[in-house]
Image (tube, helix red, strand yellow):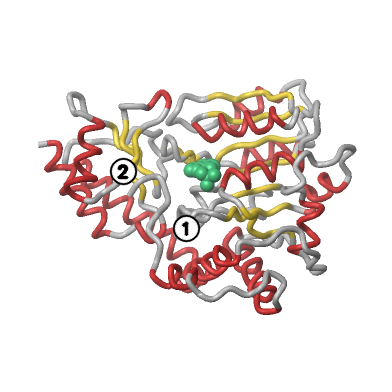
Amino acid sequence: MGPGPSDVGPSVLKAMSMPLVGHLDPVFVKMMEEIKAMLRGIFLTQNEMTFPVSGTGSAGMEFCFVNLIEPGDEVVIGVNGVFGTRMVDVAERCGAKVTKVEAPWGRIIEAQAVAEAMKGKKPKVVAVVHAETSTGALTPVEEIAKIAHAAGALFVLDTVTSLGGCPVRIDDWQVDAVYSGTQKCLSCPPGLSPVSLSPRALEAARTRKTKVQSWYLDVNLLASYWGQERVYHHTAPISMNYALHEALRLVMVEGLENRWKRHQENHQLLREGLTKLGLTLASQEGHQLWQLNAVAVPTGADEAGVRKRLLTDFGIEVGAGLGPLKGKIWRVGLMGETSKPENVKAFLSALETCLK
Ligand SMILES: Cc1ncc(COP(=O)(O)O)c(C=O)c1O
């Protein structure tokens, strides 16, 4: 019940243990097509360029930035936690001139603040984190995407923690480049990063003046592997793709909207239980994540002591606060397979015992 990886279902673990085939084997190629189709269904996009990058969520982040940014490009990034901060680092390593739109950790990035920061600028990219795993805040992004497009910029979105756990609508929101991770609400082990590029973003990557800094993450090369040509690029992690195929199948079987609803209901159950214990959530009211709950540590409680005892006495892992939230919150994940009423009840009862 930490900030990820979440629990993984038995059929996903079983899929990982299946015999290997070659990464250009027709069976694997068929599986790649099915993974791409299921990812489109979960990202709610028609984007042809939708596939899992070999690497964790941070590789997806780098994929988006290295392909879209050239040295000297202006980039506007929302920073309200660890992962917005990481985006800034990645963009700067690509040679971008970054303007940060900062919000206190736990609060959302306001569209108005993005608009203000863009005045007089002509950014190539505007980027925000949808679900900030370090704080538990969910930033609404539709308006920010409109502001980015009105200024001629591409809109990049981090959905590592949101995908599969709450609405993510890539085409409706007009997101140009999006990345996610397998180990949160998709309930697959960490190791792949689903990504999707709009035709506009792909065009930007194709018509750059300079070569993409990273050979491994260059979409122009990856397109020949994940597209119809099937030209060898790197050896895809076969077993991870088996796992993702099965995890995505489970999402499809449950139904995307049912899955979102399940995450919402278990979050609600947790909230009600916390209220009974006199506890509250620390992230901004009205924008609290269903899958990552930032529980405010009550005055006088030993934050690290409670977390340790939850693990040793009850076998329950929760996350600590990071940065300015260190010592102030417990991060309780209800992601994918972990989002179950029995987990919520076990956590509340264990927490009550620890606090007493
Ligand atoms: C919102 C967000 N973005 C990016 C990442 C980086 O993903 P990974 O740790 O899989 O590289 C994480 C990981 O927790 C995350 O929560």
> Taking the image as drawn, is residue 107 in sight?
yes
Position of 277 with respect to 164 (left or right) is left
The answer to whether residue 227 is left or right of residue 276 is right
Please tell me which residue is depicted at 64% across the width and 63% down the height of the picture.
Answer: 40
Other residues around mark 1 within 10 Å, as few (<14) / some (14–19) / many (≥20): many
Taking the image as shown, residue 90 lies to the left or right of residue 319, namely right
Which callout, 2 or 1, points at the residue further toward the start of the chain? Answer: 1
Q: Which amino acid lies under the numbered mark 1 shown in the image of this protein?
A: Pro
Q: Residue at x 52, y 39 (%)?
A: 139
- Residue found at the far top of this picture: 120
Give percent across and percent down for residue 297: 25, 31
* Labelled disc at residue 189: 1
Which residue is nearer to you in this view: 165 or 250? 250
The x, y position of residue 11, in whole percent, is: 43, 73
Please indicate, yes or no, whether residue 130 appears anywhere in the rendered image.
Answer: no
Percent position (x, y) of residue 330? 31, 36
Residue in the foreground of this view, choosing between 270 and 71 = 71
Q: Residue at label 2?
A: 318
Vertical placement of 102 versus 330: above or below? above
Answer with the quarter of the image where residue 25 lies.
bottom right
